Image (cartoon, grey):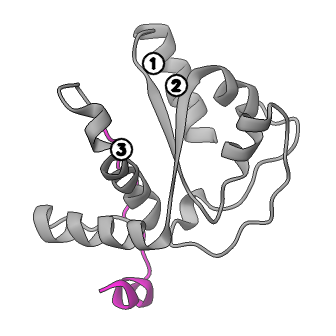
Amino acid sequence: GGLISGMTTYLNAVSPNTQVIGCLPGKSAEMYLSVKAGKFVPVQSEPTLSDGSAGGFEEGSITFPLCQKLVRDWTLVSEEEIKDSLKLILKTHHKLIEGSAAVAIASYLKRKDEFAGKNVVILLCGSNIAPATLKSIL
């Protein structure tokens, strides 16, 4: 929640009409479930290719109310969607990204019809992926 809460706080200040959509692996959806419930919901995360966004957040964390207030919507993606997105970026753009960056691509692809004709920015943060993980995906 740190990256998205910081980013949305800034964007809200400089461009209040910009809509931010949070993206998470379905196997680590604590923030999504908590925002939907309107309160902290502890969830045991499962292993995911998106290790950069895996795990929960601490109850009372400053990121939670910011995400509640500023993130317009959330998208959960599967491990298969994460793999497919990582391979797509590698194949079409020759860029190596990590699982958490692939979550953003997978989320966009899952909802791409919704964004037709709109300006869309996808934040791809990180290319830290273990060689063994990359090998298993490819």
Horizontal relation, residue 72 to residue 29: left or right? left
**Which residue in the structure is indicated by mark 3?**
111
Which of discs 1 and 3 lies nearer the camera? The answer is 3
In percent of width and height, residue 50 lies at 52, 65
Q: Position of residue 15 (x, y in %)?
A: 40, 10
Contact check, label 1 and label 2, Cβ < 8 Å: yes
- Secondary structure under badge 1? helix
Which SS class for mark 3? loop
**Can you give x and y, in whole percent of width and height, for residue 102 in the image?**
38, 60
Residue type beneath disc 3: Arg
Which of 106/6 is in front?
Answer: 106
For disc 1, the marked residue is 11
Quarter occupied by residue 65: top right
Quadrant into which the N terminus falls: top right
Magenta stretch: includes residue 116? no
Residue depicted at x 50% and y 19%: 10
Label 2 environment density (alpha carbons within 10 Å; few <14, some 14–19, many ≥20): many
Q: Nearer the viewer, residue 35 or 48?
A: 35
- The quarter holding residue 45 reads bottom right
Considering only order in the chain, which callout, 3 or 1, is on the residue closer to the N terminus?
Answer: 1
Magenta span of residues: 122-138
Asked if the residue at tag 2 contacts the one at tag 3, i.e. Cβ–Cβ closer than 8 Å, the answer is: no
Residue at mark 3 to residue at mark 2: CA–CA distance: 20 Å
In the image, what residue occupies the spot 22% across and 26% down? Answer: 119
Dot placed on the residue nearer the N-terminal end, 3 or 2: 2
Badge 1 local density, few (<14 within 10 Å), some, or many (20+)? some
Give the labeled residue for mark 2: 8
Instruction: Give the CA distance from mark 1 to mark 3.
Output: 22 Å
